[in-house]
Amino acid sequence: VYERILRTAGHESLALQEISGHLGETGYFQEALDLVYPFYDPDRHGPMPGLNLLKACADAGDAERGRDLVQKMLRQDWPQVRTVLIKFRDGFDQPPDERLAANHVNN
């Protein structure tokens, strides 16, 4: 169903936000990344779908994709989410064992 929606509405920020949010909330982190990440363009879709994808990266343990996404998002002029983006960046830069421990404490 989500694939079909994305084929017709993948350009819509709200569609990306809702799908990535729902998949993340229900524990389908990798699926959120596989389905929504290819459509997401920070300049076009704004910060909200990206924040959902960053959370999915953290929960899926995909630090490489998370670092890449944080860098793309930090290039935008989004002062309202800059602090959150920096926290994500710092978390993705931690060694895997520390990142897992921090993620466990935050959840």
Image: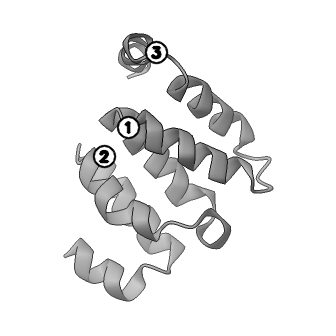
Q: Nearer the viewer, residue 71 or 19?
A: 71
* Above/below status of 74 relative to 20: above
Sequence order check, earlier mark of 1 and 2: 2
In the displayed structure image, the side of residue 94 where residue 37 appears, left or right: left
Place of residue 5 in the rendered image (x, y in percent of width and height, measured from the top left) = 30, 81
Cα–Cα span, label 1 and label 2: 17 Å
Q: Residues within 10 Å of mark 1 (few under 14, many from 20)?
A: some
User: Tag 1: residue type?
Assistant: Asp
Q: Residues within 10 Å of mark 2 (few under 14, many from 20)?
A: few
* Above/below status of 99 relative to 89: above
In the displayed structure image, the side of residue 41 where residue 98 appears, left or right: left
Number of labels in the image equals 3
Query: Which quadrant is the C terminus positioned in?
Result: top left
User: Tag 3: residue type?
Assistant: Pro
Q: Which residue is mark 3?
A: 95
Q: Which residue is mark 1?
A: 62
Cα–Cα span, label 3 and label 2: 25 Å
Sequence order check, earlier mark of 3 and 1: 1
Q: Residue at x 34, y 78 (%)?
A: 6
User: Tag 2: residue type?
Assistant: Glu
Q: Which residue is mark 2?
A: 25
User: Which quadrant of the structure image shows residue 41?
Assistant: bottom right
Q: Secondary structure at mark 1?
A: loop
Query: Which quadrant is the N terminus positioned in?
Result: bottom left
Place of residue 72 in the rendered image (x, y in percent of width and height, measured from the top left) = 64, 53
Place of residue 103 in the rendered image (x, y in percent of width and height, measured from the top left) = 40, 21
Place of residue 94 in the rendered image (x, y in percent of width and height, measured from the top left) = 52, 18
Q: Nearer the viewer, mark 3 or mark 2?
A: 3
Q: Residue at x 30, y 58 (%)?
A: 34
In the displayed structure image, the side of residue 40 where residue 38 appears, left or right: left
